[in-house]
Image (cartoon, helix red, strand yellow):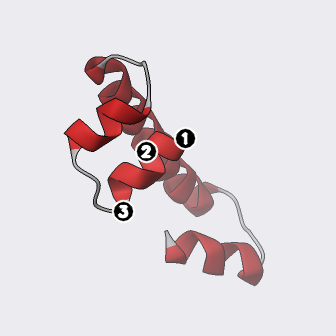
Amino acid sequence: MDVIYCWSKGATLAEVIQMTDIFEGGIIRSARRLYEFLNQSCHSSDAFPVSSEVSKLVLTM
């Protein structure tokens, strides 16, 4: 997760690759899966009523 965090903060892919022994495709696949999870989490809030505190958290994503 540190790798994805650093990449999201502006590190180049070359810098990220040096941080881990995971192949490039694995890093990108992990980033896509995280994006899909967060996207689905945001959209699931439409189907289930949530408290105002949780909706504020979702809006900050």
Q: Amino acid at mark 1?
A: Met
In this view, the residue in front, 53 or 46, is 53
Q: Measured from the top left, where is residue 6 in percent x and y?
A: 41, 53
Calculate the distance from the C-alpha at mark 1 to the C-alpha at mark 2: 5 Å
Disc 3 designates what residue? 9
41 sits left or right of 51 in the view: left
Task: Give SS at disc 3.
Answer: loop
Q: Amino acid at mark 3?
A: Lys
Count of marks overlaid on the render: 3
Rate crowding at label 3 as few (under 14), some (14 to 19) or many (20 or more) other CA atoms within 10 Å. Answer: few
Task: Give SS at disc 1.
Answer: loop
Q: Measured from the top left, where is residue 24 in percent x and y?
A: 27, 23
Are the residues tagged 3 and 2 within 8 Å (C-beta)?
A: no
Measured along the vertical axis of the image, is residue 47 above or below residue 61?
above
Are the residues tagged 1 and 2 within 8 Å (C-beta)?
A: yes
Disc 1 designates what residue? 1
Q: Earlier in the sequence, mark 3 or mark 1?
A: 1
Q: Amino acid at mark 2?
A: Ile
- Which label was assigned to residue 4? 2
